[in-house]
Amino acid sequence: MHAQIQLVAQALARAERILVITGAGLSADSGLPTYRGLGGLYNGHTEEGLPIEAALSGPMLRRDPALCWKYLAEIGRACLGARPNAGHFALAELQRRKPGCWVLTQNVDGYHRAAGSPVQRLIEIHGELSPLFCMDCRQRSFELAEHLQRPLPPRCDRCGGVLRPPVVLFEELLPEAELGRLQTQLALGFDAVLAVGTSASFAYIVEPVLRARRGGGFTAEINPQAGELSAFVDVHLEGGAADVLPQLIRHISSDKI
Ligand code: NAD
Ligand code: ZN
């Protein structure tokens, strides 16, 4: 493992443009449940016997907002109750040292921002949990935390409509602005792509890795389990994000970059 960490560190030290793709596994080390894979909360079904993808979907939010909110609130409480970990801080440090380093995250917990990742080089492709807005009159409402104290689903104080967070639910489209920023950066190319704690269930997560590979770039993965991506990356570091990322950053000595 040590030699492999050194290999990845050397490749990142040489690279100018780096894309780090993060998923629920990074925040698993903050105590948040992942969806799939190791520590997955919903490897089976919800109490209602639904796949989590159905409970947390755009159509379900409209059809049965209380049911969808039951799981949104669970995610919300978990995110508000934990903090970024050493992995998030190590990535923010990498971005400080490498002005061409971008983070593309599927997480909605806001921990990259909290750890100091610059918003200019952070793409939150699945949105964020706050502030809530009204699905009927679009009024932006209070922070999530205040609404979690009240009966669910949260309601708009102006029109009584159901409030929702600006997250991307299953079966919803990705935010155009974020997608545009991602496409612009992908078109410019990356010398190295590092995937951290993602089961890579979406094409737009796998694509940047394949693209870097095709272009002769370096690819690596940090995940305690082998998965979809492992066969496509140059190096798979089999470990937890909060453990491996700080080691990796320590190996990227400042004289090399
Ligand atoms: P996922 O749950 O599908 O996969 C998590 C991956 O992390 C798995 O491959 C697992 O083996 C790995 N993992 C587990 N512990 C790890 C650790 N300590 N270090 C590194 N890797 C570890 O997550 P995903 O690929 O991000 O996709 C799931 C969807 O769920 C996304 O759409 C995301 O928006 C959402 N989600 C977000 C959060 C959050 O914001 N923190 C939490 C759960 C789910
Ligand atoms: Zn309203």
Image (tube, rainbow, N blue to C red):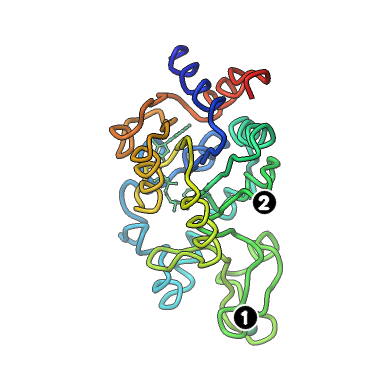
The part of the image, by quadrant, that contains residue 82 is: top right
Query: Going from the N terminus, do you reach mark 2 or mark 1 first?
Result: 2
- In the rendered view, tell whether residue 146 sits above or below residue 100: below
- Give amino acid for label 1: Arg
Badge 2 element: helix
Instruction: Give the image quarter of residue 245.
Output: top right
- Left or right placement of residue 112 versus residue 142 in this view: left
Which part of the image, by quadrant, shows the C terminus?
A: top right
Q: Position of residue 233 (x, y in %)?
A: 35, 32
Residue 205: give x, y in percent of width and height.
40, 48
Residue where numbered disc 1 is placed: 138
Q: Is mark 1 within 8 Å of ligand 2?
A: yes
* Residue at horizontal 44 percent and vertical 77 percent from the top: 62
Q: Measured from the top left, where is residue 207 in percent x and y?
A: 36, 48
In this image, 45 relative to 22: left or right?
A: left
176 left or right, relative to 215: right
**Residue flagged by tag 2: what amino acid is it?**
Val
The residue labelled by disc 2 is 119
